[in-house]
Image (spheres, rainbow, N blue to C red):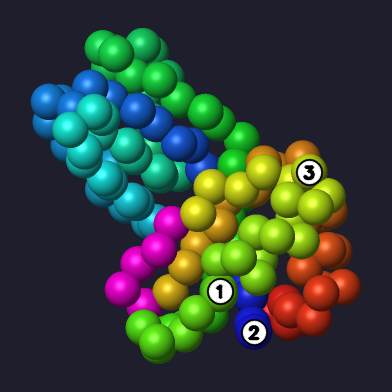
Amino acid sequence: MQLTRVPGEYSICRLDADAESPPWANRGFVSITRTEDELSIVCLSSLLPSDGSVPGLAREDGWGMIKVLGPLDFGLTGVISSIAAPLADHRVSIFSISTYDTDYFLVKQEKMDLALGLLRSYGFELL
């Protein structure tokens, strides 16, 4: 399986469930998920307002991103676990996002080199 590192630093954010989708989450990779409990947003950290102007915004900064090169067939199984398991064995936390075409994994920036090295050692091809 082929992987690539996506440039940039990402943030994982949370707003109240009834919050509007913010206008700043509109460029590059953006994932917005609304549930009954929250509005969750993953986007480039540079897009986030730094002035505290977003009421109720919780954020976790400092994430890098790895993309599984796709598109992946919907019948394909075990993609997420094949990446998550070796990283978990070495105490590397991930935040995963699936799209129609493929999967993305966020890893803390300070663990990215370790994560990429581990994935190479497990047979993943890094482009």
Q: Residue at x 45, y 44 (%)?
A: 44
Amino acid under label 2?
Answer: Met
Q: In 3D space, how far apart are the residues under numbered discs 2 and 3 (Cα atoms)?
A: 22 Å
At which x and y percent is residue 120? 82, 73
Tell me the mark number nearer the camera, choosing from 2 and 1: 1
N-terminal of the pair, mark 3 or mark 1, is: 1
The front one of 71 and 43 is: 71
Give the residue pinned by disc 3.
91
- Label 2–label 1 contact, CB within 8 A: yes
Residue at (36, 78) in percent of width and height: 101
Structural distance between the alpha carbons of marks 2 and 1: 9 Å
Q: Give the secondary structure at mark 2.
A: loop
Q: Which residue is mark 1?
A: 79
Dominant SS in magenta: loop
Residue 47 at x, y percent in the picture: 38, 37
Q: Which residue appears at 34% of the width and 51% of the height?
A: 30
Q: Which residue is mark 2?
A: 1
Residue stretch rendered in magenta on the structure: 97-101
- Horizontally, residue 49 falls left or right of residue 76, namely left
Instruction: Give the residue at x 52% y 28%.
Output: 60
Of 84 and 124, nearer the camera is 84
Q: Is residue 8 above or below residue 37?
A: below
Q: Is 126 on the left or on the right of 44, as rendered?
A: right
Mark 3 falls on what kind of element?
loop
In the image, 42 versus 23, the foreground residue is 42
Q: Position of residue 72 (x, y in %)?
A: 44, 84
Q: CA distance from mark 3 to mark 1?
A: 19 Å
Type of amino acid under label 3: Arg
- Horizontal and vertical percent for residue 53? 29, 13
90 left or right of 49? right
First in residue order: circle 2 vs circle 3: 2
